[in-house]
Amino acid sequence: MFKSLFRRNQRPALRCEATPGSRVYVVGDIHGRLDLLRRLHEMIAADAADAGSLRKVLVYLGDYVDRGEESRQVVQCLIDERLPGFEPVYLCGNHEEMMLSFLNDVSVGAMWMYNGGDATLYSYGVGLQEGATLEERHLMMQRKLRAALPESHTKFLQGLKLYHVEGDYLFVHAGVLPGRPLEEQEARDMLWIRNEFIHSGADHGKCVVHGHTIVSAPDMRDNRIGIDTGAYYSGTLTCLVLEDAGRRLLQT
């Protein structure tokens, strides 16, 4: 599918532009902070009041769940509280991938719990279980999560996209593997890659807007823009606003 979007030797202009006639809002990693999400939604709605006839796009970069105590509520908010007049785009993060994997494979349970999955389970009313072995405990938690997960949440999570494109920008959760044509990128890299992408100055064919790697302030470079400002820990949830060649920020 990437082949219709990218040319193999395409070079990004340093003056990147969003899709003409559009204003694009891009939200970083939320991680169960419903309070920050609602506050940022209010800021986005107020900011868009002067958008006039512009097409308004709202891209979420993934990692809605885990770590924060209101992971279930964040998912419900994204389903029920869509901002009027916006085209929402929901991308998948590595934490949603872990959650979905756990529903079918308890072997990922230890890794998911280590990365904050316990908070998501608690938000769905699933606590730690008793059992002779770790696998038995995880099997019980898996069964309870399956029973507690609303069908609308399952459908939402299974429908998340890996990437989105607007003009000269590619939106993806973690990044891309440098040196690999964009049409050949693998899902695991787009969800999980870190250092190999973060420390690369390579031309990716588009300016990549991503979350996943926490920064104290948005990291704007010629080939990428990182906007995961560690909302769960810092209280700062970041939104990048793109319009024509302009870039600006909204933050809680």
Image (tube, rainbow, N blue to C red):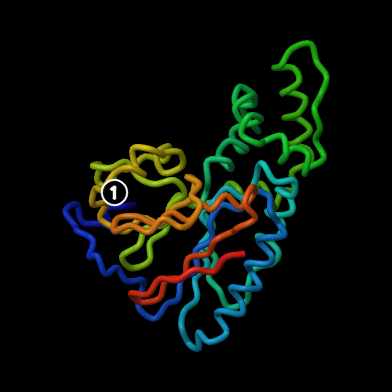
When the figure is inspected, residue 11 is found, relative to residue 109, above or below; the finding is below
Residue 187 appears left or right of 116: left
Name the residue rendered at 62%, 73% in the picture: 43
> Which quadrant does the C terminus fall into?
bottom right
Residue 111 image point, x, y percent = 59, 27
Q: Quadrant of residue 144?
A: top right
Residue 165 image point, x, y percent = 38, 61
Name the residue rendered at 53%, 46% in the picture: 93
Q: Quadrant of residue 39?
A: bottom right
When the figure is inspected, residue 164 is found, relative to residue 186, above or below; the finding is below
Q: Which residue is mark 1?
A: 182
Residue 10 image point, x, y percent = 19, 58
Residue 56 appears left or right of 237: left
Residue 108 image point, x, y percent = 60, 26
When the figure is inspected, residue 27 is found, relative to residue 184, above or below; the finding is below
Residue 181 appears left or right of 19: left
Q: Looking at the image, which residue sits at the far front?
A: 216
Q: Secondary structure at mark 1?
A: helix
Q: Amino acid at mark 1?
A: Leu
Q: Looking at the image, which residue sits at the far top?
A: 132
Name the residue rendered at 42%, 58% in the picture: 164
Q: Quadrant of residue 242?
A: bottom left
Name the residue rendered at 38%, 59% in the picture: 220
**Neighbour tally class for label 1: few under 14, some 14-19, many 20 plus, Cα within 10 Å:** many
Residue 46 appears left or right of 246: right
